[in-house]
Amino acid sequence: MKNIISLLLCCLGLSACAFPLTPTENGLITATKQFQPALFETGARGEIVSSLADNVSDDGFFSTNYTNILAFRNVQSGEVFSISTLLGKKKYDSAMLSIGTYEVVNLYLQYVYTTTETYGSTRVTTTHVVTDEHFEGDKKIRFTVRPGEVTYIGHFDLIKANNEVLPDGSVPANSFKISDKSADISEEQKAKWFSEFGKDFVVRLATVK
Amino acid sequence: MKNIFLIFSIVCFLCGCSAVAGNRKLGTSEQEIQRQMADVATKKEVREKFGTPNLIFHKDELEYYEYKNVTGHGRYLWLVPVIGWVVSLVQDNYTYCENNLFIGFDKTGKIEDWNVLQSTGTFD
């Protein structure tokens, strides 16, 4: 009996290493963007809030709902984070980040996309992760996270002018626009943020250089 | 021999679903970090023990070093047939524990203040 249990546990142990429930390093870093009041108060963290929209999701090229993604890198540490919105379901996203300067590395739209391949009798389903360099090339979008500050970095409009879909299922935006839509933020949303973060937001739009 | 194999198998299994990101020299529990801090008193010793800090910032006229690591685990509910599989579909798949060590130095590089913060959560 013990031998069977040992064998079973050993098999489970080995399979656990490959099982998708083993977190990735990137997943762990991303998880730390969740708001934690004690960390926020140390002076080592700030919070950013933003909204994103596109001209694809509504009635554009693909007539389906896409997730709008803004991926950015901490210039000092190289850690990469992202915020995302889903039109019609989630208008804003926020992230608690270490203080410092961040540079946008990617702006794109993505829908839940998986591929399934069959190897003999085994079906393997893969979800792709996109890390393309920001499409604007030399242009860099930057923003700064300041200690204990909740910063509204602007509204990002992702604009698509063709119907190109990359092989991994992601859809690169062709251009973008950053604007201050802080005046459009509802009192209800502001109250929600105030309740969560304990502070009013400050407007400091991301800059394009 | 059988018992050793059994223990090894259990350890293998439990470790299989966990991962660590960030500073590997920093302990993964508050007690461990407190033990690590017991024999350091200067900036030089801190750097020797923990390496390059994740963040350097100033607050209240002190220079602060922050070291951090994050430990994550997969949830084991999927091991429970049917009920576990269903629950796994609707809840976050991972738990994490972030350890942050903040060390404040005076102008001469001596430790004036240090603090350990732990935060936990779930993610998908």
Image (tube, coloured by chain):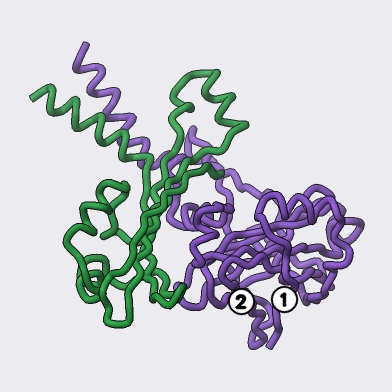
Chain colours: A purple, B green
What subunit carries mark 1?
A
Find disc 2 in the rendering and name its residue. Answer: A144
Measured as percent of width and height from the top left, residue A94 is found at 67, 58
| In this view, A208 is above or below A184 | below
Measured as percent of width and height from the top left, residue B66 is found at 39, 66
State the quadrant of the N terminus of chain A.
Answer: top left
Mark 1–mark 2 distance (CA, rounded to whole Å): 8 Å
Query: Image quarter for residue A60?
Result: bottom right
Residue placed furthest toward the right: A59
Query: Image quarter for residue A85?
Result: bottom right
| In this view, A64 is above or below B82 | below
Callout 2 crowding tier (Cα within 10 Å): few <14, some 14–19, many ≥20? many
Query: Looking at the image, which is closer to me, A165 or B2?
Result: B2
* Residue occupying image coordinates x 59% and y 66%: A148
User: Could you say whether the residue bearing mark 1 is in a helix, strand or loop?
Assistant: loop
* Residue occupying image coordinates x 22% and y 56%: B36
| In this view, A19 is above or below B7 | below
State the quadrant of the C terminus of chain A.
Answer: bottom right
Which amino acid lies under the numbered mark 1 shown in the image of this protein? Arg
Residue placed furthest toward the left: B1
What subunit carries mark 2?
A
Measured as percent of width and height from the top left, residue B56 is found at 41, 74
For marks 1 and 2 on the same chain, the one whose residue lies earlier in the sequence? 2
Which amino acid lies under the numbered mark 2 shown in the image of this protein? Thr
Q: Which mark is residue A204?
A: 1
Q: Are marks 1 and 2 in contact (CB under 8 Å)?
A: yes
* Residue occupying image coordinates x 44% and y 24%: B79
* Residue occupying image coordinates x 24% and y 69%: B46
Question: Do circles 1 and 2 both sit on a common chain?
Answer: yes
Callout 1 crowding tier (Cα within 10 Å): few <14, some 14–19, many ≥20? some
